[in-house]
Every structure is written in structure tokens, then in C-alpha cells.
Amino acid sequence: MRLGPLRCLALISLVANLANGSTRPHYGGTLHARMRATLLSLDGTPWPTDPNESAAREKLLGLIGDQLVKIDLRGNIQPSLATSWQHDAERRVWQFHLRPNVQFHDGSALLGSDAAAVLKPFCDSMVSGLVLSCKSPTPRPDLLAYLASPRASLLRNSTAGVIGTGPFRLTQWAPGKRAVLTANDAYWGGRPFVDSVEIEFGRPLREQFIEFELGRADVIEIAPGDVRRASQRGRRVWSSAPSELLVLRFTNVEDGRLREAAALAIDRQAILNVLLQRQGEASGGLLPQWVSGYAFLFSAPPDVVRARQLANEIPAANRTLAIGFDASDSTLRAIADRIGVNVRDAGLRIQTSPPNATLARIHIPEGGANHALNVIAETLGVFDVLNGSSYAIERGLLDDFRVIPIAQIPEIFGLSSRLHNWNRVWALESVWLETPGQ
């Protein structure tokens, strides 16, 4: 598998780049961020299935905790809490050497048992001081990629809440409403530039944009369809690599001809170009190219002629599709309407209820192709095709057309003019704020 960064620079104006180069970084200030997710917990299980909440939890855990390894901007694995590692030829037996003198936010030392807990789902581990060894019953070629993801952050629960070894400490927490992170002065990787980060949850995209326009927010989320509007107003916009899957999941359709007809009728490229303003990739597969390396093998151009042939084979009373979606999500609503137009052209009927298919977003986690597919399958409620290579797993999830990928889209952020050095998704330990008079 070829690793690629989940984060890439895009659409930052030339004026902003010149400003970044003319001012030196400095410490201080509070960064104000907004999220549409209603994040209720940082330490609860299971992991949230809502894509917005899942992405929000990853962002915060990535700031509070560290991982054994990290992925740089070029997609290469680099040391983090593990200074070095080695494995056998089959990648079943692994050994990690932990960084010495690392402390949790409460002052307690990082122990080998903390790292062993992260590896527990994959292998049996043995700890000797700061050396951690583990043996897996099966090869783990994606283990380092998973260990670099925020889901593999080394964390502890304390009376004060979740603590880690990361660049920020969680100092205020109002579930679903607000979180405040404060710079960790004793961080082994160097103190962050900003003093604190204030995050408000549950904020609709429209409200976020208004606060952004009024100068009350430094980081907001932007829908793909609003990128042009933000750019036309001279706002700084940054886009990641595709990290969210838009997918149609059939829930109560046993006739495979109807599922296949719908899949062949959908014009993914038109949805991408018009509704998503070319933000992302039209896709016949579940994983982006940067994650799997083989996404091009899942191309899915529309074939309306074949879709009509299949529709004509279905008894007239069963040619009905009803798509459910989050009514508060304007992007999903627009895509559902366009899919309705496509399938009607193929001879299927659209009705509003009861839904027999669901249009949804799924957050694509970092951690390699196999890990991402397991998360996607769990979110979709599919558990019977998870053996073999990542390609075989993905093919198994798609072959019966119960799951129809539509597009993979990026995370898009609006950034205030005073925010500098944003070069990857929520890597807030490296950003800094320009203050008046500089």
C-alpha cells in the first residue's frame, strides 16, 4: 500500500502566502474554532458512527495524545513516541523502543504498558522497560499506518478527564457544547505557539460562516458547494485530500436488479462537477486513491441503457426507490434529488417513504486501507466480507450493489487572516496567530 497524506494544501491565496512570509512566528493568543459535530465524549466506546462526530473526536485526540509513530507531509512514517522499531519479514513480530522522559499531562511517566494497550487489538505484547515487543497471529503490513492515526493515541483517564502526552491539555469540557485546550508547556516536542484553543460544537455551517465573516472564528468548516462563494469574497480556504465517503446503502431491497440498475443510472461525475463544485473525486470504490493505491480499478461510469434493461426485468410494483438522508444536510439533500432524477431516467420510480436506501457520509479514518475498510464496514453494518487483502475486502463489499459509492470529498476549512502555518488538518501545535500591531 502506498501511504499518502490525508492533508494537502489547496486554494490558499497568493496574498496570504506573502503575508505568511513577511511575519515571524511568535507565541500567544487563543485560536477560536467551530465544528458542526456534537461531540459528547472523548473516552467512551464504541467509536461514534456519525461521521462529523467521528472526525471531531479524531481531531481532539490527535491534539491531546501522541501516537507511537506519525506520518509526515510526504506520507512517510516518522518516529514519535517510538524512536525506532523493527519487524520480521512477515511483519508478524514487532519491537518498538519508546522515547524516554515523556510525561502525561498530570506529570506521570509514559510506560511501556501504555503502548501495549494500543497494540492489544492486534498482537500479544511483552514489556521490558521502554522496549515493547508484540507478536501477531497474522501479518500486519498496515500496523504502522494504523499506529499513526489519532485513534491510536496513547491516553489515560484521570479524575480530571482524558489526559495524554500531546501538545495540548484538555482544561474545560462541556459535552456537546464546548472544549478548551491549553498549551502543554512541558511537551516533549516543544510548546505549541498558541496559548489555547477554544472549540464550539454543534454549530451549523451557515452559522459558522457568519461568525467567520464577523471575525469571531479562526477556523470553520465549509461545505463543498460554498467554496466558490468563500473564495469570491476573498476568504482563505484550505482543502484536505479526500477523507469522507458519500455512499448509498440499500437497507431493504432484496432484488439485486434494482440495486444494480440504480448503481448504473447514477451520474457521479455530474454530481461532483455541479453539486460538489469539483471538490473531491467521483468514485466507484470506497477508498480514495491515496489510501489504497488501486481506486482507479473501481471506475463506475453511468450506463443508462443497461440500467433500463434491468429495470424492465423487474415487476412494475417493485421498481421503487425511496432514499433516506439527514434532512439537515443540504449537500445530501441535493445529491439525493439528483440521484432521483438519474434513476427515473432509467425507468425506476422514486417515492419519499418508507426509505429502502440511505444516503450517508462516512468518515475515512487514517490508519491504512484494511483499517479504513473495517471502519466503513462496521458503519454500514456489513461484517461478512472482511477476509483477505484490502482489494478483496473492498470488492466483496461492492459486488452485490448493496453499497454504492458516490464520491469521496475533502475536509474544507475557512481560515482567518491572522492564522498562519496551517499545513495539515488540525495540526494546531504548529500554527500561530498574528496579533494587532505586528
Image (cartoon, grey):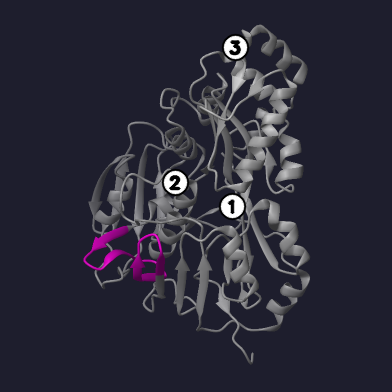
Q: Residue at x 58, y 72 (%)?
A: 218
Give the labeled residue for mark 3: 317
Q: Residue at x 46, y 32 (%)?
A: 380
Q: Residues within 10 Å of mark 3 (few under 14, many from 20)?
A: few
Task: Establish if 166 lies above or below 292.
Answer: below
* CA neighbours of label 1 inside 10 A, class few (<14), some (14 to 19), many (20+): some
- The amino acid marked with disc number 1 is Pro
Q: Name which residue lies at 53% across and 42% down.
A: 326
**Eye-nearest disc, 3 or 1:** 3
Find residue 184 and report its image quarter. Answer: bottom left
Indicate which disc, 2 or 1, sits on the residue closer to the N terminus: 1
SS at badge 1: loop
Tell me the tag on residue 5.
1
Q: Is residue 39 left or right of residue 43?
A: right
For the residue pair 88 and 437, the one nearer the viewer reads as 437
Q: Which sits earlier in the primary sequence, circle 3 or circle 1?
A: 1
Under mark 2, the amino acid is Tyr
Residue named by callout 2: 146
* Residue at the image point whose x is 51% and y is 83% from the top: 27
Residue stretch rendered in magenta on the structure = 155-179
Q: Badge 2: few (under 14), some or many (20 or more) residues near its Cα, within 10 Å? A: many
Quarter of the figure that contains the C terminus? bottom right
Going from N to C along the chain, the mark reached first, 2 or 3, is 2
Residue 174 rendering spot, x and y as whole percentages: 35, 66
